[in-house]
Amino acid sequence: MNPKIKKINAEYAKNAAKIEELQARQKELIRQRTDLENNDILELVHSHDLDISQLAALIQSMKSAPAAATQGESEGEYHDEM
């Protein structure tokens, strides 16, 4: 076999192994990020003492009227600061 082909095949195999390793690391980083985001969400829900039905109602109200749901909250925070 042509020595250049052997060299290219070796480099190809090396690159394929690196790509596989990087893809596995990327999946692990995505998993870790998702876990941390989920923990942040749980902490937020627990800090406001929301039960599952209250959380569902909040999410539903935000879906139906996103501006109204966020506007009322931010106005209350703004007035408290003054």
Image: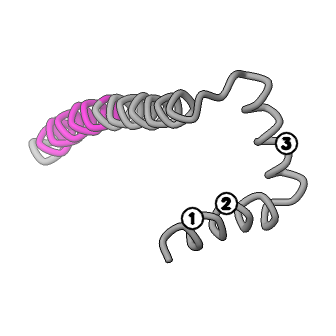
Given residues 82 and 8, the one toward you in this image is 82
3 or 2: tag closer to the N-terminus: 3
Kindly identify which residue carries mark 2. Answer: 73
Q: Residue 46 location, x and y as percent? A: 53, 27
Q: Which amino acid lies under the numbered mark 2 shown in the image of this protein?
A: Glu
Whether the residues at callouts 2 and 1 have beta carbons within 8 Å, the answer is yes
- When the figure is inspected, residue 66 is found, relative to residue 15, above or below; the finding is below
Label 2 Cα neighbours within 10 Å, binned few <14 / some 14-19 / many ≥20:
few
In the rendered view, tell whether residue 75 sits above or below residue 38.
below
Residue at 50 percent of width and 77 percent of height = 82
**In this view, which residue lies farthest toward the bottom?**
82
Q: Does the magenta stretch include residue 13?
A: yes
Q: What element carries label 2?
A: helix
Q: Which residue is drawn at 27% across and 36% down?
A: 16
Q: Which of marks 1 and 3 is in front?
A: 1
**Above or below, comparing residue 45 to residue 62 in the picture:** above
From the top left corner, tell me how far across and down residue 19 is, in percent: 28, 39
Q: What residue type is labelled 1?
A: Glu
Residue lying at 44% horizontally and 29% vertically, measured from the top left: 39
Q: Distance between the residues labelled 3 and 2?
A: 16 Å
Which stretch is magenta? Answer: 5-24
How far apart are the alpha carbons under marks 2 and 1?
6 Å
Quadrant position of residue 79: bottom right
Q: Earlier in the sequence, mark 1 or mark 3?
A: 3
User: Which residue lies under the disc numbered 3?
Assistant: 60
Question: CA separation, marks 1 and 3?
Answer: 22 Å
Q: Position of residue 64 (x, y in %)?
A: 90, 53
Please report contact status of discs 3 and 2: CB closer than 8 Å, yes or no: no
Q: What element carries label 3?
A: helix
Residue placed under numbered mark 1 in the picture:
77
Q: What residue type is labelled 3?
A: Gln
Q: Residues within 10 Å of mark 3 (few under 14, many from 20)?
A: few
